Image: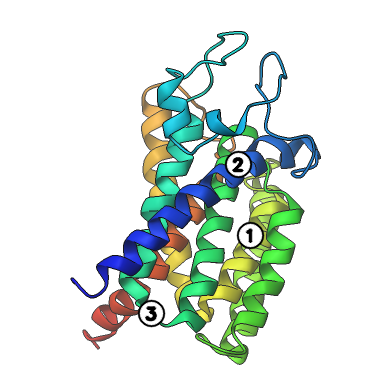
Amino acid sequence: MSEALPLVLLVALFGLMVGSFLNVCIGRLPAGESIVRPASRCPSCRSAIAWYDNVPVVGYLLLAGRCRRCHVHISARYPAVELATAAAFALQAFSVGDDLSLLGPRLVFTGLLIALFGTDLETQRLPNVLTLPGLVVGLLASLIGPPGLVDSLIGAAVGGGVLFVIRWGWKRATGVEGMGLGDVKMMAMIGAFLGWREVWLVLFLASLAGAVFGGALALTGRRSLQARLPFGTFLAAAAFAASLLGTRLLDWYLGFY
């Protein structure tokens, strides 16, 4: 543990900075805006945010969560995403260690999952600009590390294919779109990074979480059973869990046979 601590702390600090960028992606990509220009700005008065106010988490705390110019409250989503990214990156570093051929792709994968979680939660959109390049990166990464190119290709096909069939069947049976094509593309991306074996684990965990959450909302009268849930959020959480524990969970399950 002591030997891994410097790497974990360094990766966590890097995660804070990446989290700041992911906030930009979450806020702008669903609206089709550039993530490069203009520079960071207040969501309310649109004034530019100075670099010293844009330090991850610290800037938000020093300003008490308000814009320096208009004093309007800024969403707590900003420090939450930064802290979540730092924690998620640290967990990946602790799990993977200093194997850069695996750690690098896993950090990219984690960043994509956090951005997709945020966009789906806020807008129920999973932008192609995240899922499709993510699919390509997952396939390319498999050339130098796990799960290997063949498993990656099968994973992308199985992941996207299964959700596409489920989407088609549900709409045909109920007339309601249970999920969008963005979920299909996201699952293909997940399969490319994790391989076909862990696709089934992700689908199981995401479906279980979605059923429990959706059932709870329906019981409390907050949502109809036919209303569409942001399934991408459950896919993102399940895929992150699988990236950390998937192999151990599958080995444990297969050990019963």
Which comes before the other along the chain, label 3 or label 2?
3
Residue type highlighted by circle 3: Asp
The residue that disc 1 covers is 186
Is there CB contact under 8 Å for labels 3 and 1?
no
Q: Which mark's residue is nearer the viewer, 3 or 2? A: 3
Quick one: quadrant of the N terminus? bottom left
Q: Which mark's residue is nearer the viewer, 3 or 1? A: 3
Q: Is 254 left, or right, of 197 in this rendering?
A: left
- In the structure shown, which secondary structural element does the residue marked by tag 2 occupy? helix
Quick one: quadrant of the C terminus? bottom left
The residue that disc 3 covers is 98
Give the distance between the C-alpha atoms of the residues marked 3 and 1, in whole angstroms: 27 Å
Task: For residue 207, say whether it is visible.
Answer: no
Q: Nearer the viewer, residue 59 or 247?
A: 59
Q: Nearer the viewer, residue 55 or 239?
A: 55
Circle on res. 120: 2
Numbered disc total = 3
Residue type highlighted by circle 1: Met
Measuring 33% from the left and 60% from the top, which residue is drawn there? 9
Which comes before the other along the chain, label 3 or label 1?
3
- In the structure shown, which secondary structural element does the residue marked by tag 1 occupy? helix
Instruction: Indicate the position of residue 18 as horizontal and vertical percent values.
Output: 54, 51
Task: For residue 234, say whether it is visible.
Answer: yes
Counting other residues with Cα less than 10 Å from the Cα at mark 2, is it few (<14), some (14-19), or many (20 or more)?
many
Residue type highlighted by circle 2: Asp
Give the distance between the C-alpha atoms of the residues marked 3 and 2, in whole angstroms: 32 Å
Counting other residues with Cα less than 10 Å from the Cα at mark 1, is it few (<14), some (14-19), or many (20 or more)?
many
Instruction: Indicate the position of residue 158 as horizontal and vertical percent values.
Output: 61, 75
Q: Nearer the viewer, residue 192 or 18?
A: 18
Which quarter of the figure has residue 61? top left
